[in-house]
Each structure stands twice: as structure tokens, then as C-alpha cells.
Amino acid sequence: MTAITDILVRKADGSETDLSDYAGKLLLIVNTASKCGFTPQYEGLEALHRKFADRGFEVLGFPCNQFGAQEPGDAQEIATFCSLTYDVTFPVFAKVDVNGPDAAPIFRHLKKEAPGVLGTEGIKWNFTKFLVDRDGKVVDRYAPTTKPEDIEKDIEKLL
């Protein structure tokens, strides 16, 4: 089995890196979009990030344009939007596909480890969230409708 920290991801600047910087941390990995009805969840995600960062918690955002073309911007536009609109300080990586043949390796891994309802792996919409424990095990998958504040109790248990 591949360790989540060994999976290569693309940073917003286009360079490739693995997730080893996040080894030993509790992670909430989210596919995001700037023009979605769930976009205001950025505020709640940032609140979780700020509340728990000093205890080893990180939110990792991965913009995705696969659902209703709701993330049309380039990396700079996405970064500017996140910063100016929601004061996002958690890492926002390069835009990815989360489904299909071009799905990013991180999302292929997350979906395999935590299938959705009825065992389906496909991500249904923006702001699907995956909680990954300090050992790199995917412990839960949350629907786009799950508000970040509703995940707080699960984060607390794992910290």
C-alpha cells in the first residue's frame, strides 16, 4: 500500500512534490471550487485550520473544475480569490481532476480508501472532504453538504 506522504502532488506554482511535509499530521483534504454554492465553506475550512494547526492539523485544498466548470481560473486567480475573499492560509495546490482517467493520484488513493455511499468511489461534487489520521489512514469521507464545523468533533477525537 502506498503511504499518503509518498504520493506526488502538484503545487500551485506547477512544481511537483510529495506530501512528506505532512507526515504525522492530521489532514482534511478537500476538492474545492471558487464558483460553487459550497464555496463559502472556505471560511469554515480556514477556521478549522487556524483553530487546530498548532496541534498538528492541516487542511489541504485541491481546486477542481470537473463539476459545472466552477473552478475556471488559473492558479494565480484561484490563490488571489482564496486569499482576498476568505483569507485562506492553508495550502491550495494546483487544479486537479478527481474523477476519470486523469484523476490525480491523491484522489485515486483517497477514493479507494474511503468509498462513498453504496461503495462507489466517484466524487459527486466540489467540497468532498477526506479526513486522514496521523498515520496516513483515511478515516472518513464527508459529503459536500457536510459543513466544516460539523467535522470539528471528529478532528478533536483524532488530535
Image (cartoon, grey):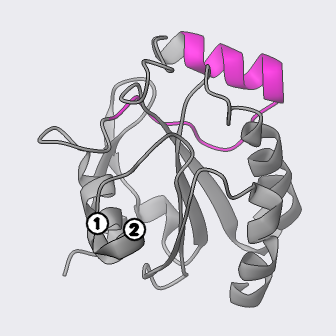
In this view, which residue lies farthest toward the front? 118
Q: Is residue 66 above or below residue 107?
A: above
Binning the other alpha carbons within 10 Å of mark 1 as few (below 14), some (14 to 19) or many (20 upward) gives: few
Q: Mark on residue 120?
A: 1
Report the magenta residues as a range. Answer: 77-96
Horizontal placement of 20 versus 2: left or right? right
Mark 2 and mark 1 in contact? Answer it, CB < 8 Å: yes
Q: Which residue is disc 2 drawn over?
A: 116
Q: Quadrant location of residue 120?
A: bottom left
Looking at the picture, which amino acid does disc 1 mark?
Thr
Q: Is residue 60 above or below residue 52?
A: above
For the N terminus, the quadrant is: bottom left
Residue under the point 11% across and 41% down: 101
Q: Is residue 111 above or below residue 40?
A: below
Looking at the picture, which amino acid does disc 2 mark?
Gly
Q: Quadrant location of residue 122?
A: bottom left
Residue 159 locus on image (x, y percent) = 73, 84
